[in-house]
Amino acid sequence: MKIVLIPDSFKGTLSSNKICEIMSEKAKSILNAEVLCVPVADGGEGSVDCFLSAMGGRKVPVTVNGPYFKQIDTYYGICGDTAVIETASCASLPMVKDDKNPLLTTTFGVGEQII
């Protein structure tokens, strides 16, 4: 038996890589199956991890402004001569939690990652 797992993240809880790890372990132990994991992302949280998992490369740590102009440690991905920027790494809804205010929040940190 062969099982192909292609999960997205569970918003704010588990990354698609972690879901693949858990599901794969259980499928192998319960079903004695061969498992192929293909973590995916929709462009939000986990997109850099999924891209690097599929294409290789590495994370580059950076410090940028978060949604409320507070410095945060985050990252972008590098694969050859391609940079992978994940907006959610510095400007996501989970970062503002219940304090959503579009008049005070910013995506400035995304631009800082690009330069």
Image: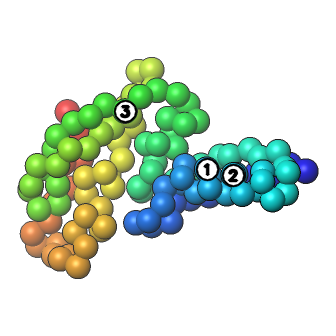
> What amino acid does circle 3 point to?
Lys
Left or right, 78 with reference to 27: left
Residue under the image location 46 percent in, 26 percent down: 57
- For the C terminus, the image quarter is top left
| Residue 114 shows in this picture | no
Task: Give the quarter of the image for residue 58.
Answer: top left
Give yes or no for contact between labels 3 and 2 (Cβ–Cβ under 8 Å). Answer: no
Indicate the position of residue 24 as horizontal and vertical percent values. 70, 51
Q: Position of residue 12 (x, y in %)?
A: 40, 66
Q: Is residue 7 rendered to the left or right of residue 92?
A: right
Classify residue 45 as left or right of residue 111: right
Q: CA distance from mark 2 to mark 1?
A: 6 Å
Q: Quadrant of residue 75?
A: top left
Is 24 situated above or below 12?
above
Residue shown at 22%/69% (left/top)?
96
Q: Is residue 52 visible?
A: yes
Whether label 2 touches label 1, CB < 8 Å:
yes
| Discs 3/2, front | 2
Crowd around label 1: few <14 · some 14–19 · many ≥20 (10 Å):
some
* Mark 3 vs mark 1, CA separation in Å: 20 Å
Above or below: residue 86 compared with residue 114: below
Amino acid at circle 1: Glu
- Give the crowd class for mark 3: few <14, some 14-19, many >=20 residues within 10 Å: some
For disc 3, the marked residue is 59
Residue type, label 2: Glu
The residue that label 1 is drawn on is 21
Task: Report the disc number at residue 25.
Answer: 2
Q: Residue furthest top?
A: 80
In the rendered structure, which disc, 3 or 1, sits on the residue that comes first in sequence? 1
